[in-house]
Image (cartoon, rainbow, N blue to C red):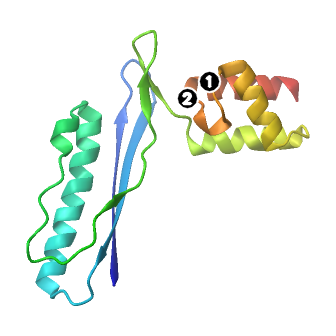
Amino acid sequence: MLKLNASYSKKVPVQGEEYSSQSYHCSVEVELSDKLEAADIQEKIHETFALVRDSVDAELHGNLQAARPAQPSAKADAAPMRVLPQPSREQTGEGRIATKASNRQIKYILDLAKSQGMGLSDVNARVKEQFGVGSVYALDRKAASQFVDELKAAA
């Protein structure tokens, strides 16, 4: 069995904010039969990368219909694709799109909390109380930024 990993990332500027951008990323892992010919493997690589690229572009443009997967090749003997989750975005009450906090923000929050003697369960309890989400990993960027400011002020 062969494994094919295809990833695609795209960074775009955020409207109205100077020196700010949003990053979109998608990764797919596909298992292929090791009995495939080189041409079939190359075709599967092309199809998989096109799926990942088109999915990111569709997410950027809010057109989820454009991200329909290409029909698998009849020649390619492959297992079904697994699409790894992307950071989710949701519409807020003010009409803006809320993007999940970055890994960097979450790590900084956890580092600040640790330096103040807080464990993950303490952080999650405080996040639930203040922001109404179940975990620090569910914060959006704006809430994470606010939480960082509060933790820095308490330090």
Q: In front here: 52 or 14? A: 52
**Residue type (three-letter) at the residue carrying disc 2:** Asp
CA separation in Å, label 1 and label 2: 5 Å
Q: Quadrant of residue 65?
A: top left
Query: Are circles 1 and 2 on residues that touch, CB within 8 Å?
Result: yes
* Residue 55 badge: none
| Farthest-out residue, right | 117
Q: Position of residue 71 (x, y in %)?
A: 11, 59
In which quarter of the view is residue 17 placed?
A: top left
Quadrant where the N terminus lies? Answer: bottom left
Say which residue appears at 56% left-offset and 29% top-offset. 141
Q: Amino acid at mark 1?
A: Ala
Q: Quadrant of the C terminus?
A: top right
Q: Residue tagged by mark 2?
A: 140
| Residue 14 vertical placement versus 85 (above, below) | above
Question: In the image as oriented, which residue stretches furthest toward the left?
Answer: 74
Helix, strand or loop status at disc 1: helix
In the rendering, which numbered label is found on residue 143?
Answer: 1
Please provide percent x and percent y for residue 86: 42, 45
Asked if residue 34 lies left or right of residue 151, the reply is: left
Give x and y (percent) for residue 138.
59, 34
Callout 2: helix, strand or loop?
A: loop
- Of residues 33 and 100, which is closer to you in this image? 33
The crowd level at tag 2 (other Cα within 10 Å; few <14, some 14-19, many 20+) is many
The image shows residue 68 at horizontal and vertical percentages of 17, 47
**Vertically, is 120 above or below 96?**
below
Number of labelled discs?
2
Which residue is depicted at the point 80% across and 28% down? 152
| Of 60 and 83, the residue lying toward us | 83
- The 10 Å Cα crowd at callout 1, few under 14, some 14 to 19, many 20 or more, is some
Position above or below: 118 against 69: above
